[in-house]
Amino acid sequence: MVKKCLSVLCLFLFALLVYADIAPAEIKADYGGSLRLRQEYWENVIDLETLKAPDRDFFRLRTSLWGKVDFNPNIGIYTRVTNEARYYLGNFKPFEIAPGRPGYETSDSDRFDEDELIIDNLYLDVKNIFGLPLDLRIGRQDFLGQYGEGFVILDGTPGDGSRTFYFNAAKATLKLHKNHSVDFIYIYNRQIDDLLPSLYPARSDYLAGYYRNRKVLNVSDERGYVVYGKSKLNDYFSIEPYFIRKEEDSVGRYGHRAPGPKSELHLNTYGGRVVFTAANWKIRGEYARQYGEYDDHGKDRDREGDGGYIFIGQKYAELPFKPEWELGYIYLSGDERGTSSKHEGWNPLFSRAPSWNEILVYPMVYESMPDAGAIPAYWTNLRLYKLGMKLNLAKTTNLALSYQYLRAVEKTNISSPVFSNDSKERGHIGTLLLAHSFTKQIDGFLQIEYFAPGAFYGHDAEDAIFARWQLQFRF
């Protein structure tokens, strides 16, 4: 079915190109790239030292090259290729399998991960189709910064961290007015990158996060159908109502070894985002409800949940350092363990990313694994109270600080040293981000997060530290 739809779309787009009035003088081409170097240090981040998982200390070098051709103001193509190699220090070796574990004979003590060379973006843009106020973008594309703060749509490839964010998608934008538009999106994301050619090393399938030698990008194949509206009502108010239907397959082809859902999920989400700005004040909020069901081979199980956030902040542009503050609350429903016929936990849809902090997304894996596999950032079962502050230390330097108090909505009741099962207090997190632009092409930052776990976690849980620095060069 998917191949037939893609074939029809390709024929339609080919017809557009054939009948488009393209003059050679109008054709414009451009290219560029980026190099991003990071070092990350994780102390007790994986399991808060409750399972004795080794700490991580590693370098990441992401290389990207892009090119685009605009045939005329209304038709263009864009492509980008990416690789992110890593080198690990310390006790952790990414390809090592412990003696006695399945696949031990394929164990490798190599510290260098050369990674895959992948087509990160490849899409065709067609604007004002047949003279109508309708734009179309089809292909592999990012949605970063396009849908609010990424509460429901942000990252289509959570399994590879921040290497890529792409969605295999077709998006049509209906421009009703300069201040009002509606996006219609079809999404088809895969467990691994097998829709486009790539170069990848022969890594063992017994390694966590690999299948057919390729990195696992999603827990299972998934599809999305999105209607997302954007309206600026006046100089003060904007609203973004949306409907999203998401279909998640079971854990699928590698499910005999990997954790994750053993049945399909069909989930409908209705929600909206509102932003109010006046003078130096800003209020932003979002709320969504979810209804759906798992297909447990004839024994259907309901899935319901809700989530949202509200933030209020103020900026003092006339004061030294132009200080800003923000106070917010985030709520994501949790699963009530006594209701076996219903799952009440929030599903983050296409937003498995470190939205509010980096350090919590890894311990959360152990509580969401049956529903979401071993990929981090399955945000659910959370009450988060956040106080943030930002200072502009110089024209090209800013400092962002935050304190976060976290609680769970429901206890886990999971038999694991990671959890106590007798408290909802997750703990306290402090964050620091110091960013600086050296030139228009070179920037960097230093990021530090500290997590003091609460009684929600096991009595052996220890404080965790996440640290990262980055240098990035764009050309």
Image: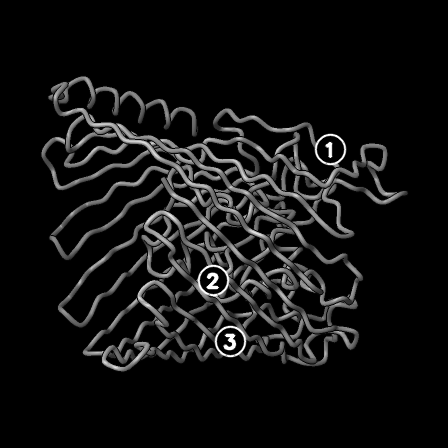
Q: Which residue appears at 57% of the width and 42% of the height? A: 220
Q: Which residue appears at 59% of the width and 75% of the height? A: 408
Residue type indicated by callout 1: Ser
From where the camera sits, is residue 342 visible?
no
Work out whether 101 lies above or below 55. Answer: above
**Image quadrant in which the C terminus is located:** top left
Q: Residues within 10 Å of mark 2 (few under 14, many from 20)?
A: some
Mark 1 in CB contact with mark 3 (< 8 angstroms): no
Residue type indicated by callout 2: Ser
Work out whether 185 lies above or below 447. Answer: above
Q: Is residue 161 left or right of residue 465?
A: left
From where the camera sits, is residue 303 visible?
yes
Residue 110: horizontal and vertical position, in percent? 75, 37
Residue 69: horizontal and vertical position, in percent? 26, 27
Toward which corner of the image does residue 125 lie, by quadrant? top left
Label 1 secondary element? loop
Label 2 secondary element? loop
Mark 3 in CB contact with mark 2 (< 8 angstroms): no
Q: Which residue is mark 2?
A: 355
Which of the two residues, 406 or 252, is positioned nearer the viewer here?
406
Toward which corner of the image does residue 241 lie, by quadrant? bottom left
Label number found at residue 240: none
Q: Earlier in the sequence, mark 2 or mark 1?
A: 1
Q: Which residue is mark 1?
A: 204
Label 3 secondary element? strand
Measure how far apart labels 3 and 2 are at the Cα level. Answer: 12 Å
- Foreground: disc 3 or disc 2: 2
Residue 102: horizontal and vertical position, in percent? 83, 39
Measure how far apart labels 2 and 1 are at the Cα level. Answer: 31 Å
Q: Which residue is mark 3?
A: 384
